[in-house]
Amino acid sequence: MTEERPVLVATEANDVTADMVIAHLNQRGVPVARFDTADFGVDLTVSARFGVGPVPVAGQIRTSSRIVGLERVGAVYWRRPVWPVFEHLQEDDARSAAAQVRYGLGGTLYGLRGCLWLNHPLRNAAADYKPAQLALAHHMGLTVPPTLVTNDPDEARRFIREHRQVIHKTLRWTPYERDGVGLTSWAESVRADELDDTVRITPHLFQARVDKVADVRVLIVGRRTFAVRIDSDLLDWRRDYTALSYSVVDLPNRLERTLLAYLDHFGLASGSFDLAVGRDGEFHWLELNPNGQWGWLEEQTGLEMAAAFADLLVAGQPEQGEVDVLA
């Protein structure tokens, strides 16, 4: 990407991780237009033309401080934007307005060609289904803990009795409150006698517990790999960040190549993998977060992760091995 081609950064208002990447882009003199989709109609305006001229999409996106020609965009960093909900409108009107923004603004941006997406939202969504992740991981030869997805309580009880130490995970994180108190869903140990017929309401993910000695978070940016070992006594290390210790590790070459191929399968330029290290030294697959957090790992280890994101955005083209998201 030439210096003049701007980078669009779509994220929520308070995003320290995006700030880290933008700081590197600013140091390099790269034009950056940051916006949140929630600001549409207030500090965010789009005008796009299709079927006229030599480019598929022409027009402008305007923020409170920038005007960017859509045909000149070199890269889009799609972090964590929030879609508007239009709370000031009646329910049906709000639902309709929100849909128009998602499919109008989103569809316009998704149609941009010749630029890098980090990552394309449609590719993020396709890669975010845990059962599909498990199937692909097994297909690619990764070590996958025995896992059951079911809404049959009898099947779940049989699985737990067969594997004895089993954990339960949500299939998808969603905002969740009970009596006005926000709840977070952790990986939890589960016993057969704890299950009742409410299991039938939704699918549940049950997984044989890995006899682990540590966890590993692997961030891949383009073709660069950053692997951090996380030591703790916790089943789910996200419960208490103060109880964690970190060390930079190198992955076996075959594992690194497989994780790169995994991202290529979904057409992702970046992703965060969670692995567990068993007592036998084996790396066990846990999951992929296509748009995972990594900022705190850079702070803890000094790994130049934000610079790697900036490098990729400045390059502005999918690197070798990546998939054109709209091919």
Image: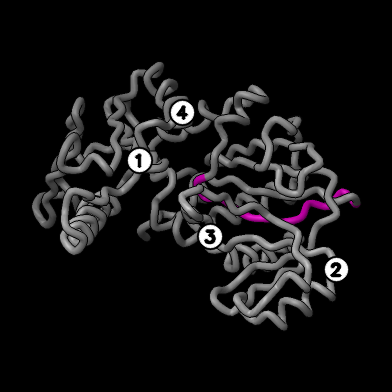
| Alpha-carbon span between mark 1 and mark 3 | 25 Å
What is the residue that sits farthest to the left in this orientation?
52
Q: Say whether residue 75 is visible.
A: no
Name the residue type under label 4.
Answer: Val
Nearer to us of marks 4 and 1 is 4
Name the residue type under label 3.
Answer: Arg
- Element under disc 4: helix
N-terminal label among 1 and 3: 1
Identify the residue at image location x=54%, y=54%: 264
Residue 172 got which mark?
Answer: 3
| Alpha-carbon span between mark 2 and mark 4 | 41 Å
N-terminal label among 2 and 3: 2
146 with respect to 94 (left or right): right
Q: In which quadrant of the rendered view does residue 187 lie?
A: bottom right
256 with respect to 203 (left or right): right
Name the residue type under label 1.
Answer: Val
N-terminal label among 1 and 2: 1
Nearer to us of marks 1 and 3 is 3
Residue 164 got which mark?
Answer: 2
- Element under disc 1: strand
Mark 1 vs 3: CB contact within 8 A: no
Q: Which residue is mark 1?
A: 76
Residue 94 location in percent, x, y? Answer: 20, 57
Question: Which residues lie in the magenta part?
Answer: 280-291
| Alpha-carbon span between mark 1 and mark 2 | 46 Å
93 with respect to 310 (left or right): left
Identify the residue at image location x=35%, y=40%: 76
Q: Which residue is mark 4?
A: 16
- Element under disc 3: loop
Identify the residue at image location x=85%, y=45%: 213
N-terminal label among 2 and 4: 4
